[in-house]
C-alpha cells in the first residue's frame, strides 16, 4: 500500500489514531516507515478530543484533555505540524448508500434523517450555549500546548451543517460559528481551520460565505491549515457525495482560488467513493481523486504563477 501511494505521487499523509495515545516512539516508527517511501507526515488525528466527557462537559474531561495534550507534544517533537479536530458529539453523517455512475457513494437526506434516523443520543438535550462552553474549555486548555509544540490546530466544520442533530446542538455550521471560534482563540498563532469543501458546499447560502469567500477570508489571513477536497451533488436538504468531477461545485475553481491566496498546506481526498474491486484504502478511488487533484494543482500553478 505504501508503494502504491508513492506510485500515484502522494507526498504527504495524515495519520489517524483512536482514543489511546500512541506515544512518541510509535509515531516515530510510522514516520520513519513512510519516509522510506518518500512520504512525509504532515498531520495527525488522535481521538481523545472526541471524548464525550470533553465535548459534553462531563466529569473526567481533564484526564482526556491531558491525553490529547500529550499527543500534541509528541507531534511537535517529530515535526508533525497539523492536528485536525472536530466538535460535534451528536453527529450523523449518512442516511443511505447510493449508486452514482456505477460507484457507491454516501447520501444524506434531511427528511429521512428527521423521520427515520434521528433519536436523542444522550440522557438529555445539549444546547448551543453548552457546546460553546465545552469547546471554549477544551481549546483554552490545548492551545497553549499546541503553541509551545509548534502544532497548528485545524478545526473541521459540522458535517452536515445543521443546527441540531440527535438532541445535541452544533455550532460550527457557518461562517459566524468559525468567526466566534477564532475570537475565542484570542489571536493564537496556531488556531485555524480545516476547510471541508464538501461540507461547505452542502450548506449553500446558509453558510454565510461560500467556499471561495471562505478561502479568500481565512486563507488570505494564513488561517487555512488543511483542506478536505470533496464535491457533492446539491445543497441541503438532500445531497450525495461524489468524485471531484461529478458534483455541482467547480473544483478547479476551488483549487485555483487556493493558489491565489498562496495556500501551501495540505489537501486530502475526502470520503472517497468505492469503485469496483476497492478494498482497504480503496486504491482505485484514491488514485482517481489524487490524479484529479494533481492535474488541477498543476494547471492552477501554471495559471496563477
Image (cartoon, rainbow, N blue to C red):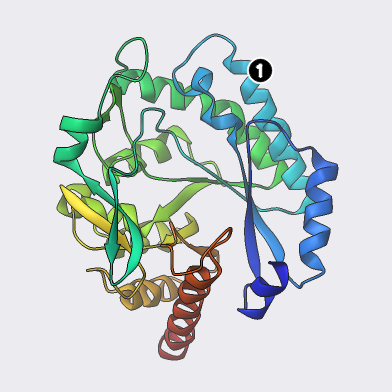
Q: Residue at x 18, y 39 (%)?
A: 112
- The residue closer to the viewer here, 105 or 28, is 105
Q: Is residue 305 above or below residue 191?
A: below
Q: Is residue 246 above or below residue 192?
A: below
Taking the image as shown, residue 295 lies to the left or right of residue 143, namely left
Callout count? 1
Q: Is residue 55 above or below residue 264?
A: above
Q: Is residue 32 above or below residue 124?
A: below
Can you give x and y, in whole percent of width and height, for residue 49 in the image? 56, 31
Q: Confirm whether residue 161 shows in the render.
A: yes
Q: Residue at x 69, y 39 (%)?
A: 72
Q: Residues within 10 Å of mark 1 (few under 14, many from 20)?
A: few
Looking at the image, the residue that sits furthest to the bottom is: 302
- Disc 1 marks which residue? 63
Q: Quadrant of the N terminus?
A: bottom right
Can you give x and y, in whole percent of width and height, for residue 220 in the image? 41, 63
Taking the image as shown, residue 148 lies to the left or right of residue 299, namely right
- The residue closer to the viewer here, 63 or 81, is 63
Can you give x and y, in whole percent of width and height, for residue 162 in the image? 24, 38
Q: Residue at x 78, y 54 (%)?
A: 30
Query: Secondary structure beneath disc 1?
Result: helix
Taking the image as shown, residue 81 lies to the left or right of residue 240, namely right
Quarter assignment of residue 66: top right
Quarter assignment of residue 144: top right
Q: Confirm whether residue 236 shows in the render.
A: no
Can you give x and y, in whole percent of width and height, for residue 267 in the image? 51, 64
Q: Residue at x 36, y 69 (%)?
A: 243
Quarter assignment of residue 67: top right
Amino acid at each position: 500500500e505504501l508503494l502504491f501511494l508513492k506510485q500515484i505521487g502522494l507526498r504527504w499523509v495524515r495519520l489517524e489514531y483512536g482514543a489511546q495515545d500512541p506515544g512518541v516512539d510509535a509515531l516515530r516508527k510510522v514516520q520513519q516507515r513512510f519516509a522510506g517511501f518518500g512520504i512525509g507526515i504532515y498531520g495527525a488525528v488522535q481521538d481523545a478530543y472526541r471524548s464525550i466527557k470533553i465535548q459534553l462537559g462531563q466529569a473526567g474531561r481533564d484526564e482526556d484533555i491531558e491525553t490529547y495534550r500529550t499527543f500534541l507534544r509528541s507531534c511537535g517533537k517529530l515535526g508533525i505540524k497539523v492536528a485536525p479536530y472536530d466538535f460535534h458529539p451528536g453527529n450523523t453523517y449518512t442516511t443511505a448508500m447510493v449508486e452514482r455512475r456505477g460507484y457507491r457513494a454516501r447520501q444524506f437526506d434531511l427528511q429521512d434523517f428527521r423521520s427515520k434516523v434521528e433519536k436523542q443520543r444522550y440522557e438529555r438535550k445539549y444546547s448551543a450555549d453548552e457546546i460553546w462552553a465545552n469547546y471554549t474549555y477544551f481549546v483554552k486548555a490545548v492551545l497553549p500546548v499546541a503553541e509551545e509544540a509548534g502544532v497548528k490546530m485545524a478545526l473541521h466544520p459540522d458535517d452536515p451543517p445543521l443546527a441540531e442533530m440527535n438532541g445535541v446542538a452544533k455550532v460550527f455550521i457557518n461562517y459566524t460559528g468559525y468567526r466566534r471560534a477564532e475570537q475565542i482563540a484570542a489571536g493564537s498563532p496556531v488556531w485555524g481551520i480545516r476547510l471541508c469543501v464538501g461540507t461547505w458546499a452542502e450548506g449553500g447560502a446558509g453558510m454565510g460565505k461560500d467556499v471561495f469567500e471562505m478561502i479568500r477570508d481565512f486563507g488570505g489571513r494564513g488561517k487555512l491549515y488543511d483542506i478536505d477536497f470533496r464535491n457533492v451533488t446539491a445543497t441541503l436538504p438532500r445531497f450525495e457525495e461524489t468524485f471531484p468531477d461529478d458534483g455541482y461545485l467547480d473544483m478547479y475553481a476551488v483549487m485555483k482560488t487556493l493558489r491565489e491566496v498562496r495556500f501551501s498546506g495540505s489537501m486530502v481526498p475526502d470520503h472517497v467513493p468505492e469503485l469496483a474491486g476497492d478494498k482497504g484504502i480503496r486504491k482505485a478511488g484514491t488514485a482517481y481523486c489524487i490524479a484529479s487533484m494533481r492535474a488541477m494543482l498543476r494547471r492552477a500553478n501554471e495559471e496563477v504563477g
